[in-house]
Image: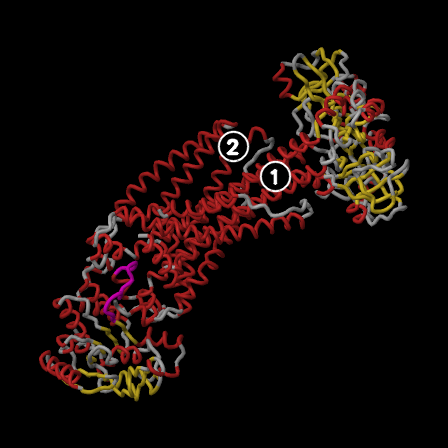
């Protein structure tokens, strides 16, 4: 039986081509993902192991901004650690944000990847963590830069470097350029080294360190050292051996990559799922063509099982070959992905390509299993062919009956799915979302089962139009498209799945994007928002600078504050009372914002309703510095997305904070936003590269831009599923042309010219593609709406946006896909040898 | 049934003519001469049958004259048109406008109704069918009550009658049939042949058919015998018996040579 399978595969090489391609692409996606993440993981693990290679014990303190005054390891403790028997060296570290300007005054790097730290020389004047290629370590008034940053900023030793930390910009002299094994730097971040005193002052307080790294003298055991070090530490510090730390980081890397892995594999799964349709189509056709042959085998004594097995063996063989090629392709993909990420600036640590047995196993497993599963139904059908079919010239298939069963099942499943979606949408929230997810799955499944039924009326509806515009080619194309409703349905389904996802995501993304836009317009009055590029709090010097700047009409910071009320901690925004309603749209419901200046608070209506607070109430609270006090509710206002639910005068809040945490500064200018107004702000801030000044459009982009980027990534990942769907269209058309050779020959004989034969095939492809696309976009819009309903509550200003322009583009692309998919089949149809075609058996 | 005058007036003219037509397949050892300088006229208003043993070149002759196949030497004219000079596109147009075809099988498009199949050549040409003529043809083949049926709902004989109607519907200069009764039982075959003869007699059509069936050939006005790519004999007003006798002669010759 296996020999028969092998012969069959070899005999139908051309017709199996698309199947092989589909499986191959899917497998390449899977194996590429696995190899890429394995390789990346391995490289990152090596990287982190290397950075902790020499570290015997690492001490860390975790301090948030509020208790900076209390945490840290003082110099005396460090000295004690250095004095422990078996310690070769112990270096204290402090670190925080530090950005460097490039020659144009712009920040090098992306804000969150800019780090500053102390240069901690040992007795020999060297810090083992850094290898200087130029110059030497920094002294007061100097900095050192990592190689890549120095190159990017075109800085030479002795140059003045503009360095921004949380405070004002400083001009410091470059003392040296270094290389390091630091993972963040190797991943493309920048690192500025300061002398110890400056760094401590900037990032903690003089004489204190955040972390200590201990290296062991030869012969000393890490665990023994750990015990000794731990005995010396203050309460809030933790110590770990370097090895434990490396392992912990490896685990973090692992879990970070698992997320990436899962996402990529989900998309690979979609692509493979789409491939199933194509494979099933191919095997159905191969078996239809071999009906007599298979019946003959049955007649000469092959059992049903054997027939079924021979078909499945054939599928397995195809899957195996496709997986092998796909795996090779996947390796290429993994390499390409890595260089692509390098090209986009997300530098990956170097390392060898890691091909794990799991990756190999899953690639082949997935490829073979998918192919065999997809061929299961056709194989069953093959086994049902009665031996007598060998004698008949035509084997009648009972299509009508099975379509009735199919349609009934499809209708029930679709209806159930739709009901669940609508129910979920009206219910909303998390439960609703689960209902919708389940409903969506069933609705999709049901529609796919129903597609053959749907294809007839839908395509019949466009037939007059096609006939009118394209004449006889259009008429024949429309009819050919519904000739084999199952096959058309399967082909269209493959496209529909991809487009459902693409459209659903677009609807959701753009709806949320627009809600954000509206939120910005409705809630913000300020012309500009000023923040740190690093996302960290700003120094109060920036606020003072802006308050004193020319042409500024209103300035209010939004500072993070809060207080304890009964059992809950309530976050509050501390603001400048006189300016707050000039920079934000605040709708006061009760009371007056003027009371803020008297030390009262304003509460948004949602919180006020929830807690039963009214204007005039007095609340007993505990402030951040543990002091007890009372706050009076002076006003209630409608919630503002850019503010916390409680507003408080910053003069009141600051008294209880170690240092004000200025998250943003909102500025209104005299003449409204303009280039000169912005420049005035930038100048007032001392041309600080680490500070971003954003107008309303930029604020919208900062939030909505991410949504667009996400959408494009999704489109990119779904492209694989769409490519496989296109292969499916090619496959179906090639089959149609092959099966209708005689008919096409007859048409050519009675006068249909080559051009119109081509057009006929092309239009058939366009009709099938558009049918799938229309169905897919309709389902996508429905799903987008349903999911949108569940998040509507949590997104203020939610209003469904139907991205007609994008939907039009998707449909146009689907039409184009049809034209492209028909290129080869149409050509072969037009080139068909008429005489061979019309020759009878 | 009335005959239209213009057709009647063409009666002595030649509808198609092949002059020293040659067709060779392959080269060297495998070289086969399918047609060896064949010259023949097909007169208007005549039903001609082409007969000959397998491999005699009878199908090739028809394919070349009908513009379905290319030839290597000589010339072919359909009416006033010289085929040798035509490109594929012009040939296609010629077939569409001037030639009707009836094949042994795969004659009809399964997706179209009988009527749509009949008017397909005019559809392709973008012409409106001549309704009076169409009615006449449909009535002749007796398909009036079957026009809305699809081929799958028709018997083999009915399907072939649709094919005959299609070939006639566009009023071509000449109709070619390739074993038009090859797939039919004898009664249906006789019916179809009757229609073909009728179309020649009453509608003054020109029909050329390739057949290996002596009974089919006996419906013709003239039978042309081919062997080894040459015309070896011709018979006018044949009967089934006389055709059969002549065929037997070939067989005997073939065996002795």
Secondary structure under the numbered disc 1 in the rendered image? helix
Magenta region includes residue A73:
no
Dominant secondary structure, magenta: loop
Q: Which quadrant would residue B119 be assigned to in this image?
A: bottom left
Q: How many marks?
A: 2
How far from the left and from the top, in percent, is residue A171? 88, 40
Q: Which quadrant would residue B26 be assigned to in this image?
A: bottom left
Question: A409 or A555: which is nearer to us?
Answer: A409
Crowding around mark 1 (Cα neighbors within 10 Å: few <14, some 14 to 19, many 20+) is: many
Magenta region includes residue B108:
yes
In the image: residue B184, left or right of residue A24:
left
- Measure the C-alpha gap from mark 1 to mark 2: 15 Å
Image height of A628 relative to A38, above or below: above
In the image: residue A801, left or right of residue A215:
left
Find disc 2 in the rendering and name its residue: A789
Question: Is there one chain holding both mark 1 and mark 2?
Answer: yes
The residue lying at 57 percent from left, 51 percent from top is A333
Callout 1–callout 2 Cβ contact below 8 Å: no
Crowding around mark 2 (Cα neighbors within 10 Å: few <14, some 14 to 19, many 20+) is: many
Q: What's drawn in magenta, residue-wise? A: B102-113
Residue A405 shows which numbered tag?
none
Secondary structure under the numbered disc 2 in the rendered image? helix
């Amino acid at each position: 039986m296996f020999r028969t399978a092998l012969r069959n595969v070899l005999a139908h090489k051309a017709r199996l081509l698309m199947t092989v391609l589909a499986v191959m692409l899917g497998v390449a996606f899977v194996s590429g993902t696995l190899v890429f993440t394995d390789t990346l993981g391995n490289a990152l693990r090596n990287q982190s192991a290397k950075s902790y290679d020499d570290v015997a014990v690492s001490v860390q303190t975790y301090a948030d901004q509020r208790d900076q005054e209390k945490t840290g390891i003082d110099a005396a403790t460090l000295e004690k650690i250095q004095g422990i028997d078996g310690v070769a060296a112990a270096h204290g570290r402090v670190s925080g944000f530090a950005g460097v300007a490039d020659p144009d005054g712009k920040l090098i790097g992306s804000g969150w990847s800019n780090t500053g730290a102390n240069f901690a020389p040992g007795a020999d004047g060297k810090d083992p963590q850094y290898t200087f290629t130029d110059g030497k370590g920094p002294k007061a008034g100097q900095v050192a830069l990592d190689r890549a940053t120095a190159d990017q900023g075109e800085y030479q030793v002795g140059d003045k470097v503009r360095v921004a930390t949380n405070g004002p910009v400083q001009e410091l002299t470059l003392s040296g350029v270094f290389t390091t094994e630091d993972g963040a730097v190797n991943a493309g971040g920048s690192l500025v080294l300061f002398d110890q005193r400056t760094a401590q002052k900037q990032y903690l307080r003089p004489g204190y360190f955040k972390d200590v790294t201990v290296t062991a003298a030869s012969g000393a055991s890490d665990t023994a050292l750990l015990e000794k070090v731990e005995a010396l530490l203050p309460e809030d510090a933790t110590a770990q051996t370097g090895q434990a730390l490396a392992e912990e980081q490896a685990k973090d890397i692992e879990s970070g990559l698992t997320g990436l892995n899962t996402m990529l594999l989900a998309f690979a799964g979609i692509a493979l799922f789409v491939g199933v349709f194509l494979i099933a189509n191919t095997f159905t056709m191969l078996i239809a063509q071999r009906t007599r042959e298979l019946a003959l085998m049955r007649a000469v004594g092959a059992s049903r099982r054997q027939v079924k097995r021979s078909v499945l063996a054939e599928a397995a063989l195809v899957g195996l070959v496709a997986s092998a090629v796909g795996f090779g392709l996947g390796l290429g993909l993994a390499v390409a992905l890595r260089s692509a990420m390098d090209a986009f600036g997300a530098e990956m640590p170097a390392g060898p390509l890691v091909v794990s047995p799991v990756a190999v196993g899953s690639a082949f497993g997935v490829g073979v299993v998918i192919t065999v599963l997809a061929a299961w139904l056709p194989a069953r059908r093959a086994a049902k062919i009665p031996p007598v079919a060998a004698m008949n010239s035509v084997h009648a298939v009972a299509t009508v009956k099975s379509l009735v069963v199919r349609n009934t099942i499809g209708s029930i499943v679709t209806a159930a799915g739709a009901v669940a979606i609508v129910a979920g949408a009206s219910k909303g929230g998390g439960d609703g979302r689960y209902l919708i997810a389940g409903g969506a799955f069933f609705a999709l499944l049901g529609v796919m089962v129903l597609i053959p039924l749907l294809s007839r009326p839908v395509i019949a509806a466009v037939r007059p139009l096609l006939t009118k515009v394209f004449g006889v080619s259009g008429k024949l194309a429309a009819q050919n498209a519904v000739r084999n409703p199952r096959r058309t349905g399967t082909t269209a389904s493959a496209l529909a799945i991809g487009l459902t996802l693409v459209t659903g995501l677009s609807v959701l993304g753009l709806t949320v994007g627009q809600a954000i836009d509206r939120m910005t317009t409705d809630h913000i009055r300020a012309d500009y928002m000023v923040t740190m590029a690093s996302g960290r709090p700003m120094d109060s010097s920036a606020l003072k600078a802006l308050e004193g700047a020319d042409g500024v009409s209103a300035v209010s910071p939004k500072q993070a504050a809060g207080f304890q009320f009964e059992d809950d901690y309530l976050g509050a925004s501390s603001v400048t009372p006189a300016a707050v309603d000039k920079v934000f749209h605040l709708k006061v419901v009760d009371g007056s914002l003027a009371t803020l200046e008297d030390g009262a608070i304003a509460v948004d209506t949602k919180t006020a309703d929830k807690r039963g607070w009214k204007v005039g109430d007095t609340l007993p609270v505990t402030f951040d510095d543990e002091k007890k006090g009372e706050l009076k509710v002076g006003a209630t206002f409608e919630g503002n997305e850019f503010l916390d639910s409680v507003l408080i005068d910053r003069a009141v809040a600051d008294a209880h904070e170690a240092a004000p945490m200025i998250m943003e500064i909102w500025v209104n200018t005299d003449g409204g936003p303009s280039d000169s107004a912005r420049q005035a702000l930038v100048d007032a801030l001392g041309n600080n590269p680490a500070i971003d000044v954003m107008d309303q459009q930029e604020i919208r982009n900062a939030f909505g831009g991410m949504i667009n980027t996400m959408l494009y990534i999704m489109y990119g990942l779904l492209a694989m599923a769409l490519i496989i769907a296109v292969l499916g269209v090619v496959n179906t058309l090639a089959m149609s042309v092959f099966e209708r050779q005689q008919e096409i020959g007859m048409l050519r004989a009675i006068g249909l010219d080559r051009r119109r034969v081509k057009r006929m095939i092309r239009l058939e492809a366009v009709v099938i593609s558009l049918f799938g696309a229309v169905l897919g976009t309709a389902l996508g819009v429905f799903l987008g709406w349903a999911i949108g309903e569940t998040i509507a509550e949590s997104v203020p200003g939610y209003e469904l946006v139907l991205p007609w322009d994008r939907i039009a583009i998707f449909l146009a692309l689907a039409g184009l896909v049809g034209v492209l998919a028909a290129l080869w089949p149409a050509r072969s149809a037009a080139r068909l040898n008429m005489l061979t075609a019309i020759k009878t058996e | 049934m009335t005959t239209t005058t213009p057709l009647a007036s063409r009666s002595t003219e030649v509808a198609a003519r092949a002059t020293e037509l040659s067709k060779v397949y392959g080269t060297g050892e495998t070289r086969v001469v399918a047609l060896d300088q064949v010259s023949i006229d097909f007169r208007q208003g005549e039903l001609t049958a082409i007969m000959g043993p397998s491999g005699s070149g009878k199908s090739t002759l028809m394919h070349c004259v009908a513009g379905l196949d290319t030839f290597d030497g000589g010339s072919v004219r359909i009416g006033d048109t010289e085929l040798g000079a035509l490109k594929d596109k012009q040939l296609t147009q010629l077939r569409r406008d001037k030639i009707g075809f009836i094949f042994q099988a795969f004659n009809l498009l399964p997706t179209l109704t009988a009527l749509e199949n009949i008017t397909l050549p005019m559809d392709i040409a973008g012409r409106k069918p001549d309704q009076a003529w169409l009615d006449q043809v449909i009535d002749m083949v007796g398909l009036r009550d079957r026009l809305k049926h699809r081929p799958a709902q028709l018997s083999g004989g009915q399907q072939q009658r649709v094919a005959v109607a299609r070939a006639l519907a566009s009023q071509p200069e000449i109709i070619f049939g390739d074993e038009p009764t090859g797939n039919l039982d004898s009664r249906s075959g006789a019916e179809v042949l009757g229609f073909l003869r009728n179309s020649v007699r009453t509608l003054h059509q020109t029909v050329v058919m390739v057949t290996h069936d002596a009974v089919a050939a006996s419906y013709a006005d003239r039978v042309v015998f081919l062997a080894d790519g040459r015309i070896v004999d011709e018979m006018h007003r044949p009967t089934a018996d006389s055709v059969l006798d002549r065929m037997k002669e070939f067989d005997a010759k073939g065996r002795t040579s």
